[in-house]
Amino acid sequence: MPALAIIGSGPAGYTAAIYAARANLEPVLFTGRQAGGQLTTTTEVENFPGFPEGIMGPELMTRFEQQAARFGTVIRQGCEIVSVEKTAAGFALKINDLYQGTETVEVFQAVIVATGASARYAGLPGESEFLDGTGKKTGLTACATCDGAFYKNVPVCVVGGGDTACEEANFLTKFASKVYLVHRRDVPWPIPRSRRCGTRRRPVTSPTPRASWRPLSSRIPRTAASLALR
Ligand SMILES: Cc1cc2nc3c(=O)[nH]c(=O)nc-3n(C[C@H](O)[C@H](O)[C@H](O)COP(=O)(O)OP(=O)(O)OC[C@H]3O[C@@H](n4cnc5c(N)ncnc54)[C@H](O)[C@@H]3O)c2cc1C
């Protein structure tokens, strides 16, 4: 029985594969529908160590793949895992081969899930037009850590009122001349204790000098978002 299955071919999946392959665990990596993960949808990646001039997202992910393959990772392109079931024998993975149109089951001793995440957009008019994965050129991005540095000394608006929006707004105060956090409620909402994370509450409970938390009317988000789109 193969020792290890890795589900996902983003940076997390390939990093796991490189380490596992070098530890002789003979990993089998299932790429899923988006081979190479989210970074294949962007242009220049500037914050990756080892690439002082930056590197294009797809090229970076090709290098990840080559490095994992070099140490013996079996890469199963176009294979999506439909379910994982714990059995007496191990973990039974139902594999949907998107190229062959077949569905099979294989059993592994262990599984690493590296299926990533994706941004949930606001669905505003003009959003898809401006959001093409090159945040620095378009003025609209879904990742402050990735693109915040491109917005030095300009006012920036974060649309959203959850933990992630607060964290991103907090991060952006390092660059932007002003950060607006636009949300739908009149007051900061109570986050259940079970979901609280100290650092993520910071923009609400102790705003940094340049972060503002002001209730806005429900009509504002669209206005603010369209400002950000310009
Ligand atoms: C437009 C854009 C620009 C970005 N720019 C930067 C940047 O400049 N710098 C930076 O640090 N970060 C950037 N990011 C964020 C970065 O891409 C993510 O943090 C990173 O890709 C997360 O890696 P991951 O391996 O966890 O998941 P992902 O990259 O999301 O990969 C998930 C993988 O799981 C696979 N998968 C999902 N479900 C299944 C399944 N059922 N079966 C098999 N496989 C499955 C997918 O096919 C995919 O290969 C950017 C993101 C976007 C969208």
Image (cartoon, helix red, strand yellow):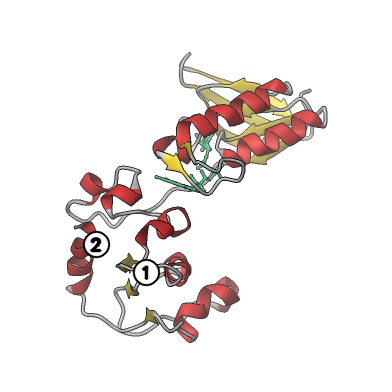
Q: Which residue is mark 2?
A: 228
| Image location (x, y in percent) of residue 67 | 66, 27
Depth order, front residue of 10/111 = 10
Quarter the C terminus occupies: bottom left
Disc 1/disc 2 C-alpha distance (Å): 13 Å
Dot placed on the residue nearer the N-terminal end, 1 or 2: 1
Left-right relation of 13 to 27? left
For numbered disc 2, what is the local secondary structure? helix
Q: Which residue is mark 1?
A: 176
Q: Is residue 93 above or below residue 169?
A: above
Which quarter of the picture shows residue 16? Answer: top right
The residue at 56%/71% (across/down) is 195
Q: Is residue 120 above or below residue 75?
A: below
As drawn, the label of residue 184 is none
| Image location (x, y in percent) of residue 186 | 30, 84
The residue at 29%/83% (across/down) is 215
The amino acid at mark 2 is: Ala
